[in-house]
Image (cartoon, helix red, strand yellow):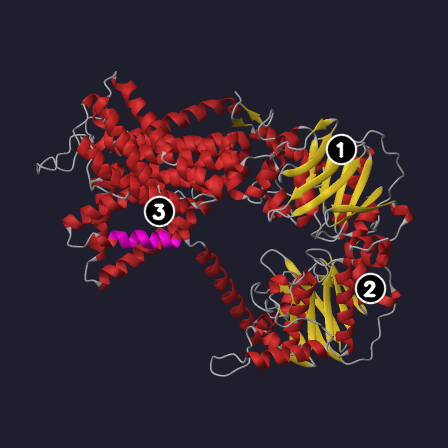
Amino acid sequence: MSAPQDTKQVILETKDIVKQFPRVLANNDVNITLHEGEILSLLGENGAGKSTLMNVLYGLYTPTSGKILLNGQEVQFNSPKDAIDLGLGMVHQHFMLLDPFTVTENIILGSEPGKRGTIDYKQARREVKEISEKYNLKIDPDAPIETLSVGLQQRVEILKALYRRAKILILDEPTAVLTPQEVDELFEVIRDLRNSGVSVIIITHKLEEVMAISDRVYILRGGEVVGERNTSDTDKTDLANLMVGREVVLTVEKEDKQAGDTPILTIEDLRVLNLKNFPAIDGLSLDVKPGEIVGIAGVDGNGQTELAEALMGLLSVDSGKITHLGDDITHMGTKELIGRSISYVPSDRHRFGLILPMTIGENIMLGYHDRKPYVRGIQLNYKYINSHAEELVEAYDIRTPDVQNPAEKLSGGNQQKVILARELSREPTFLLVSQPTRGLDVGAIEYIHKQILAMRDRNVAILLISLELEEIFALSDRIEVLYEGKIVKEFDPKKTSHKEVGYYMTGGKE
Amino acid sequence: MDIKKLKPVFFIASILMAVIGTTLYMGSYFSGLLFILAAVVLFLAYKWLESGTAALLGLIKAGAQALMVPVFGIAIAIVLGALVMLASNYDPVESYRALFYGAFVQNWHVSVLNAAPLMFTGLSVALAFHAGLFNIGAEGQYYIGAMAATFLGLNLNLPPFLSLILIFVIAGMLASAWNIVPAILKVRTGAHEVITTMMLAHTARYLSPIFIRAHGGDPSTSDHAYVTDQLPEANWLPRFRSFLPEANYRLHVGILIGIAMALLVYYLLYHTRIGFEIRAVGQNKDAARAQGISIGKNIMMALLLAGFLAGLAGVNQVVGLDHKLYENLSAGYGWNGISVALLASSHPIGVIFTALLWGALDAGGQYMARVTDTSNSIVEIIKGIILFLVVAKYIYAYLGNRIRRYRRRKQEAAEGAA
């Protein structure tokens, strides 16, 4: 493929950037160029070096060697302040906003207009309004941040950068937290920005995102640039192969399979109150048959968390009935549920899945730590715990030198594999999987999807909750759309589209 | 013959040496150190037989790494202490000589006496830390334990060892009961244990004058105003002198119970289901709950066990050292237990050593103040600096980064010049 041509002026350029950490070469001779008014993607798996490169550009890291050229001039950033002063802006994946403060206050924070320690709020408000109109980023300047949706909060972050006169905007995994509709709006915003002369760099590991929005893409792997493509000349498979360094299967092959007749799990008219005493699940009915994957599609915050927690006995059920293998388990505690072949892969693996400072062996034992052969009397049998963990590390391809290493030392993908190993090896009859691939890279996603489908082949009843429509479509045999705590529509994934499901996810009516 | 068959021999010999060595050393027989050394060598040999050279080296390296921060902290504290002494016109060389001589040779028995209660309260705070709880009220549980031990000691008239065991168990349980209210409040309402246990610590402390008056304290006489009656000798803890004739007459075996308790807490935390649940809740209560572990049960368990351990400190003082309960004799063992636990990073085995260090610094300080004109308060300054340097671990990470950055800059400059 020929090198992409671009005649526009080069605004930012890196020359042979090397960043050496004590044990890792995070960037090795990285050369990238960014043109004026261009949307550029940096694509790579976790650990490919994209974040390191961005932190070098933003002045958070000093490169071990190499140069940064801005408008042809060599520059040196010793701190983000230097980068901001020279027209770079960054929107982090985790927003840096003060929740109780208003939009205006957040935007001006750190560069407030006014004299001698006073803040000229009138001027600030006017300036924020001007910028928001100029770039077509509609927002209420007086709204407190905590009242805004995630998408709007991200908009505030972008405005923050523009307020500081950013000509180059770096977005780190910008769609990770957005709903499909918000993603579309963000893409609109990014295109508008490009048209008004702002150059945008998007750091991502999502192929769809690269294809949908960027003009050009660099693919990073192992700290090096392994490819450069004009988006118009490439496709997802090409990018994925470059990114992973081998042939990958983007959508795992799924064979047709007849689900069993008798449901393993039945939910009838379930009502669950959240912590604010508001019915987060309100009259939900559902069943899952053996050898079937039921996908719950929905925008975040429509009751996914509460549904999962109620099923696992972590949140009490207000009314309704849950049946597992013919027994009423509505008010059963977590411990008993785990004891009756129900497995759970939680969405937030750091918070609910793993005890990070504990060893891999201990994490695999967790939950079964009160039964033989993990424990004899009250004494834990570490010989068995570790040898069992070693077997699972082997079987689930978890990359670690030692099962006695703490779980926090593993990469995200390997952490998720530890949870899968624990839950799947317990031979569940019902498996609840919530957001199993959040934040993982293509290779890990492929592996985890294969494992889930393998459980389906073994006639496990699987309930999949995911915010990623891609994932729902790739795995589900049946799609249930969750909206405001109810199932509003059921689809056969073969007979519907992302668009149709998305319509119902956002409250669309027939 | 296969040397591997000797594995259990090495293990048993090591344990035996450790027991003998510890007993001798705690009884101020310094030959005990040789036994302890022998125990360490035998244990390393056992580990080597069990898991080979690489694992042994790994173990030694991990041990050395764990010790680096405290040793470094102590060294810096000693240097800074010297500077303070210089600035206040004391002779640091002479003072330190007296301090260490007093702490580890001349008055080693005082160090050991000081360390015993600290070991119990240190373990109490450390255990609670593992459950993510701050048992700041160990002082209160200490008083409850001491009062209960006095009451039982005055009233029990059973065969000697039976009554001692009963005193330890019952007084410990009463001290543990002192933590029931904070535990219930924490589980039911989320009320912070720092507040509740601290308030109850003051309550317990000011219950003691009432208790003392009810058990022999007589405000109308000057020589019996603030102290209870003495416990009958049958209810005193045995002293080292009964089997080691040269031991100081006050030195009792409480320290051995403390060390045994540290080993027990270690076993509980790292080798049992109960300890695993406590640690799981302490490190990530959400994940623990998602795997069916009850948070409330384990908070309760940890606070009750912590209360029990802190109570034993009071028992130890009453049946071991004082044989009566004094008023206004607040040595602050509960509060100092917090330092001891922090310094040990909450590791139960570490608590043995930090309690001894703390006890030794106190003993050495008193000795130093007696034989030189250096003020005792220098010891408190050194303790403060040690604690600061050891607890504030991030300082080392920061310094490490600075040094690395400096080296790189220098290297870059050198390369630039070349």
Q: What amino acid type is highlighted by mark number 3? A: Ser
Above or below — where is B11 with respect to B94? above
For this orientation, the residue located farthest to the top is B159
Taking the magenta stretch, the answer to whether it contains residue B387 is: yes
Query: Counting other residues with Cα less than 10 Å from the Cα at mark 3, is it few (<14), some (14-19), or many (20 or more)?
Result: many
Work out whether mark 2 precedes mark 1 in sequence or the reverse, and give the earlier one.
2
Q: Residue A508, percent across and down? A: 82, 55
The tag on residue B335 is: none
What SS does tag 3 mark? helix
Q: What amino acid type is highlighted by mark number 2? A: Ala
Left of B102 or right of it: where is A283?
right
Q: Label 3 belongs to which residue?
A: B339
Q: Label 1 belongs to which residue?
A: A265
> What is the distance, in whole Å, between disc 2 and disc 1 at their CAs?
39 Å
Q: Label 2 belongs to which residue?
A: A212
Residue A35 placement: quadrant? bottom right
Protein chain holding label 2? A
Residue B264 visible, this orientation: yes
Quick check: marks 2 and 1 in contact, CB under 8 Å?
no
Q: What amino acid type is highlighted by mark number 1? A: Leu
Query: Counting other residues with Cα less than 10 Å from the Cα at mark 1, is it few (<14), some (14-19), or many (20 or more)?
Result: many
Protein chain holding label 3? B
> What is the distance, in whole Å, between disc 3 and disc 1 at their CAs?
53 Å
Protein chain holding label 1? A
Dividing the image into 4 quarters, which one contains the C terminus of chain B? Answer: bottom right
Q: Residue B93, percent across and down? A: 22, 55
| Residue extent of the magenta highlight | B379-389
